[in-house]
Image (tube, rainbow, N blue to C red):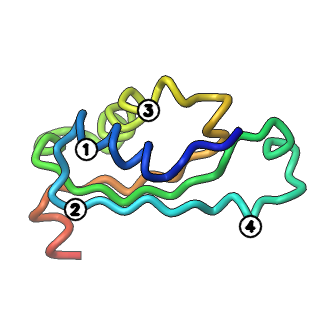
Amino acid sequence: MAADPTHIDALLRAALEPTYLTVRDDSAAHAGHAGAASGGGHYDVTIVSDQFAGKSRVTRHRMVYDALRSLFPVQIHALAVSAYTDEEYQSR
């Protein structure tokens, strides 16, 4: 069973206190894909948080994955992450 995007949103908000967050469910675009057979969904997350300041891209992704750990691999099969500080997001 795929995760509900609102549940992903709530977990990320609780853990990382973002100033901006979008969670997009891309599962329909992956229908028939082997990973989709297990029921896990494909999601795209854009998140802006002060907690990312001074952190590498890899560390930021780990922070997001850690916040969603309870959903892997059954409810989330694939997750694309774009993680920024406020300053980075405003200047992109």
- Give the amino acid at mark 1: Arg
Q: Which mark is residue 48?
A: none
State the image coordinates of residue 67 (x, y, percent, origin top left). Answer: 36, 31
Q: Nearer the viewer, mark 1 or mark 4?
A: 1
Q: Are marks 2 and 3 in contact (CB under 8 Å)?
A: no
Dot 3 falls on a residue whose secondary structure is loop
Q: Is residue 4 above or below residue 20?
A: above
Dot 1 falls on a residue whose secondary structure is helix
The structure residue drawn at horizontal position 77% and vertical position 59%, both measured from the top left corner, is: 30
N-terminal of the two: label 1 or label 4? 1
Considering the image in quadrants, where does the C terminus appear?
Answer: bottom left
Marks 1/4: CA–CA distance: 26 Å
Considering the image in quadrants, where does the N terminus appear?
Answer: top right
Q: Which residue is mark 3?
A: 68
Quadrant for residue 86, please give it.
bottom left
Mark 1: few, some, or many residues within 10 Å (few <14, many ≥20)?
A: some
State the image coordinates of residue 3 (x, y, percent, origin top left). Answer: 58, 43
The structure residue drawn at horizontal position 64% and vertical position 52%, both measured from the top left corner, is: 42
N-terminal of the two: label 2 or label 1? 1
Quadrant for residue 59, please give it.
top left
Q: Which mark is residue 29?
A: 4
Mark 2: few, some, or many residues within 10 Å (few <14, many ≥20)?
A: some
Q: Which residue is mark 2?
A: 20
Dot 2 falls on a residue whose secondary structure is strand
- 27 to the left or right of 83: right
- Give the amino acid at mark 3: Leu
Mark 4: few, some, or many residues within 10 Å (few <14, many ≥20)?
A: few
Nearer-the-camera pick, 26 or 92: 26
Q: Which residue is mark 1?
A: 13
